[in-house]
Image (cartoon, rainbow, N blue to C red):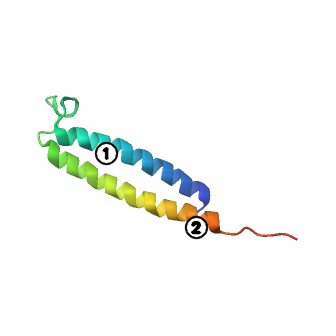
Amino acid sequence: MFSAGYAWCCIVLSAFAIIILSTIGALFSSGHETMMGSVDDPTDGKSVASTIFAAVVVYAVFLVFCGAQAWLNSRQRGVQLT
């Protein structure tokens, strides 16, 4: 559906987003002071964490889809000029 370059870019961005968002979600879930210690921070860290983990699932779906696109692009034969 799209080129190998776009697929690999999507893979890298999705993997990075999964790592970063999982870390942020874990900090909210545990009620860590860096996420929950200020006056302006949300009071319910568990609900914020569940929203962030939902975003992680969306990025995981993108990762699988883009990985499949990269795999299909690697299997596609180029034009052979003889």
Q: Is residue 5 above or below residue 23?
A: below
Q: Quadrant of residue 36?
A: top left
In the image, residue 75 above or below residue 60: below
- Residue 30 percent location from the top left of the image: 18, 39
Q: Residue at x 35, y 58 (%)?
A: 58
Q: Residue at x 44, y 49 (%)?
A: 15
Residue 56, x across and y down, in percent: 33, 52
> Which residue occupies the extreme right position in the image?
82
Point out the residue furthest to the left here.
43
Name which residue type carries label 1: Ser
SS at badge 1: helix
Which quadrant is home to the C terminus?
A: bottom right
Looking at the rendered structure, the kind of residue marked 2 is Leu
The label on residue 22 is 1
Q: Which residue is mark 2?
A: 72
Q: Is residue 77 left or right of residue 73?
A: right
Q: Which image quadrant is residue 33 in? A: top left
